[in-house]
Amino acid sequence: MGSLPHVVEDCFGLLKLYSDGSISRNPEIPSATPLLNDASVLYKDFLFDSKENLHLRLYKPTSSTTDAKLPILFYFHGGGFCFGSRSFPHFHNLSIRLAAAFNMLVIAPDHRLAPENRLPAAVDDACQALKWLQGQAMHGNDEDMDTLLTGVDFDRVFVLGDSSGGNLAHHLAVRFKAGSIELAPVRVRGYVLLAPFFGGIVRTRSEEERPCEAFWNLEMYERFWRLSIPAGSTLDHPLVNPFGPSGQNLAEVPLDPILVVVGGGEILRDRVEDYATRLKHLGKKTEFVEFEGQQHGFLTDHPFSEVAEKVIQRIRDFILENSN
């Protein structure tokens, strides 16, 4: 008789991969954060991909300080491509915070998760979410949807991604290129990458010297990559390492403005700075902002903190700078 399947990858007990290839997930949402229901923001879920049964959540401020149309902000959550949903309390709370702080319509899409659906599934789903908005701009006919999309500006769209969502934001910027002509009448004006989750075979100094943050550690990051990269790939796959040996030549790709944000205490800090520096050297409009001492997920975990207000102000400035 053969031996029973045993656990080969365990993520907090919430996701387990077994030796026979089977997978189990704990249905409980892991969060000590209470769900925020702010009357200043209306939100509702909609199906955006019937084939994959994927939903997104729209967040719209109930009152506006201006008669102008509301810009749109896509928010792609983190989770190492293996966890996460628009419904997770800390992601939901940040979406409310962003909608109220920026006076924008926030769109928070889900994507398929690894290891059941390895990359590029999440990238494909992120693209589909933007194509969904294009469809609404051209043919919207759902009454509930029309109510939430009334008075929004499809010509002023920004994309914000956190951690693995920041990785998605990068690939969206490359996929749709400057001006996002393929998405017309939707126009993306810029991308915000919050501690984008990139990797590589050669470790950076911060990866070597910071073996552990308060919660995250390098072994955990590498586990997420093992579970999410295409089968048989390495950490130099272009979806993991945009500037790796197999990466696309981005010098040839016109990109919209990119704001890159990272905490100074993050394991990812040096890799993120290197990414921003390389884009600048290629002549891309890129800004790198570091928040000293902050660790991974500092905005998502504490969206009302003093440092969160500084991040939000910097993003607000970026949106204003690139709205005309």
Image (cartoon, rainbow, N blue to C red):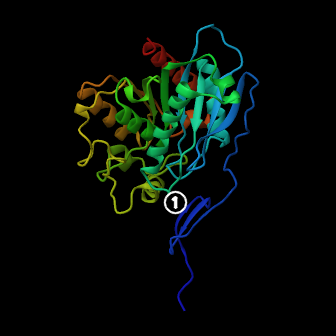
Q: How many marks?
A: 1
Tell me residue 38's x, y (percent).
Answer: 74, 27
Q: Is 180 rendered above or below residue 87?
A: above
Q: Residue at x 55, y 48 (%)?
A: 215
Q: Nearer the viewer, residue 321 or 145?
A: 145
Q: Amino acid at mark 1?
A: Glu
Residue that carries the numbered disc 1 in the rendered image: 116
Tell me residue 90's x, y (percent).
Answer: 64, 39
Q: Can residue 306 be seen in the rendering of this structure? A: no
Q: Give the position of the C terminus as an image quadrant.
A: top left
Quadrant location of residue 148? top right
Tell me residue 118's x, y (percent).
Answer: 45, 56
Q: Give the position of the N terminus as an image quadrant.
A: bottom right
Q: Is 252 rendered above or below residue 228?
A: above
Q: Secondary structure at mark 1?
A: loop
The residue most toward the top is 67
Q: Residue at x 75, y 31 (%)?
A: 37
Tag 1: Cα neighbours inside 10 Å, few (<14), some, or many (≥20)? Answer: some
Q: Nearer the viewer, residue 265 or 273?
A: 273
Tell me residue 93's x, y (percent).
Answer: 66, 33
Q: Residue at x 70, y 45 (%)?
A: 32
Q: Can residue 44 be seen in the rendering of this structure? A: yes
